[in-house]
Image (tube, rainbow, N blue to C red):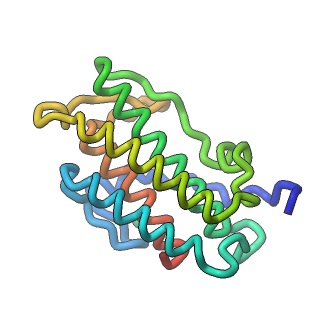
Amino acid sequence: MDTAPEPGMPDNRDWTTVLDGGCDECGYTPHDPVTTSERMTSAAERWRTVLVRAGAAERPAPRVWSPLEYAGHSRDLIGVLGDRLEAMLGGENPTYADLDGEAAVREHAYWKADPADLSDQLALDTERTRGILAGVGDDDWERTGRRGDGYEFTIGSLCQYIVHDVEHHLHDVNG
Ligand SMILES: [Zn+2]
């Protein structure tokens, strides 16, 4: 498919609630941020399994992302986690650049990505973000940063927030 498909469904829910109560849709309960690196490795392996499936590029409904698009979005999230960790380690309470997930999926044209290439890119971005995580010292987990809307994360809560997001999308695609 060369022309851009329809946008996905808008998602206006405030997902920061999962930081306190977990997620009743995918079963996530807030993890110990120290284990973030392991969870990211596990998620990258699960995405690899999803992306070798036949039909990974097919949308289940016109406005629901295909597994390939969800994988691309998850790759973006993993990169954003690395960028935001760098900003929080390098400065006091920075404001993050916003991520428009839908725009990023369209900009990267993930619907026509090669699934094997995307697997490799997701794994590489996972390694990059894990490398940055390795530099988070015991005293750094409470360092803060702010989203464009003013919501304040710590390094620990941002790790929980983004790991949930990636794991939720694996749940979306039965990965
Ligand atoms: Zn969830």
How many marks do you count on the picture?
A: 0
Across and down, in percent, residue 65 comes to: 67, 65
Q: Which residue is drawn at 71% across and 70% down?
A: 57
Identified at 50% across, 68% down, the residue is: 48
Quarter of the picture for ligand 1?
A: bottom left
Q: In which quarter of the image is residue 50?
A: bottom right
Q: Does 84 sit left or right of 66 as displayed?
A: left
Residue depicted at x 35% and y 57%: 40
Is the residue 35 above or below the residue 171 in the image? above
Q: Is residue 89 above or below residue 52?
A: above
- Name the foreground residue: 55 vs 148: 55
Image point (74%, 51%), residue name: 109
Relative horizontal placement of residue 53, taking residue 23 as reference (left or right): right
Residue ranking furthest to the left: 138
Q: Is residue 30 left or right of residue 104?
A: left
Locate residue 72: give its quadrant. Answer: bottom right
Residue 155 place in picture, x, y as percent: 27, 38
Looking at the picture, tell me which residue is in the foreground, 24 or 81. Answer: 81
Is 109 situated left or right of 147 in this image?
Answer: right
| Percent coordinates x, y for residue 1 in the rendering | 85, 63
On screen, residue 107 above or below 74:
above
Q: Residue 47 at x, y = what percent? A: 49, 67
Residue at the farthest top position = 91
Task: Please name whichever residue, 106 or 126, is drawn nearer the observer in this view of the structure.
Answer: 126
